[in-house]
Image (tube, rainbow, N blue to C red):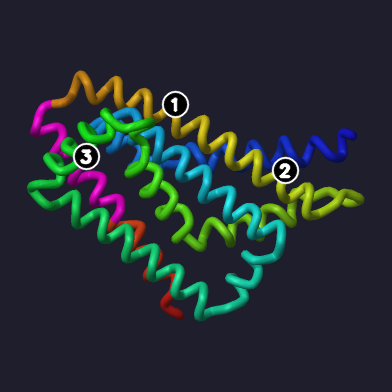
Amino acid sequence: MPHVFLPLLSFAAAWGVLVLTPGTETALVIRLGMNVSCKAALGAALGTGTGLAIWGMGTAFGVSALVAASPTVYLMLEWAGAFYLAYLGMRLLMPSAGKHDQAVAEVQARSVGGMGTGYQRGLLTTCLNPLVGVFDLTAFSQFIPAGVHRVSYSLLLAGVQVVMAVAWYALLACLAFSLGRVLSTPRVVRALDMLTAGVFFFFAFRLVMSGIPS
């Protein structure tokens, strides 16, 4: 049994480093937690987890390999992801962004769960990032031990991804919301919007450049 669990622990350690590394999901959760609502940020955490589950299952059943092997499909996903991140960044730079999101938060507060917008953003941000699929393709093959059912073990690795990511981003959402209640001045809110927009633009640019042959 150690030959089954040791690779799982090694994968969890490697994935933990990536989850803790700031990226688009981190920026999204922090921004929603501080400027919108805790529910919206938690929704983004769940949406990210759903996106990871989709990529993980795609890797387990060979869909991610087909995406990676098709330059056209891969490039379309890259550009779609870059466009979506740029769209989110542009919205944050608009003067009415904070007021709009606050209005959304008030509507969500009266709805069941109030996580819809955050969930959608987290889901799309992760699903439209083909680099997640490339990571899964590379990492899963390295951590699957000999003598196990590859599909089942791949799904187990995907489950580890989802649980760790959702747990971390949910904690981050709660911390960001608590901090946002203290630092909720218009100047701080606007500065966070601009910083988050910069992060989105950076990763959108990186997605575009990764799809341009050198």
Q: Position of residue 188 (x, y in %)?
A: 14, 32
What residue type is disc 3 on? Answer: Val
**Residue at position x 45%, y 80% in the image:** 213
Dot 3 or dot 1, earlier in sequence: 3
Q: In which quadrant will I find the C terminus?
A: bottom left
Q: In which quadrant will I find the N terminus?
A: top right
At mark 3, the secondary structure is helix
Dot 1 or dot 2, earlier in sequence: 2
Which of the 4 image quarters holds residue 171?
A: top left
Q: Which mark is residue 171?
A: 1
Magenta stretch, residue numbers:
185-200
- Mark 1 vs mark 2, CA separation in Å: 23 Å
Residue where numbered disc 3 is placed: 104
**Residue at position x 79%, y 49% in the image:** 152
| Residue 165 seen in render | yes
What residue type is disc 1 on? Answer: Leu
Q: Would residue 101 appear left or right of 60 to someone viewing this image?
A: left
Badge 3 vs badge 2, beta-carbon distance below 8 Å? no
Residue 76 drawn above or below residue 104:
below
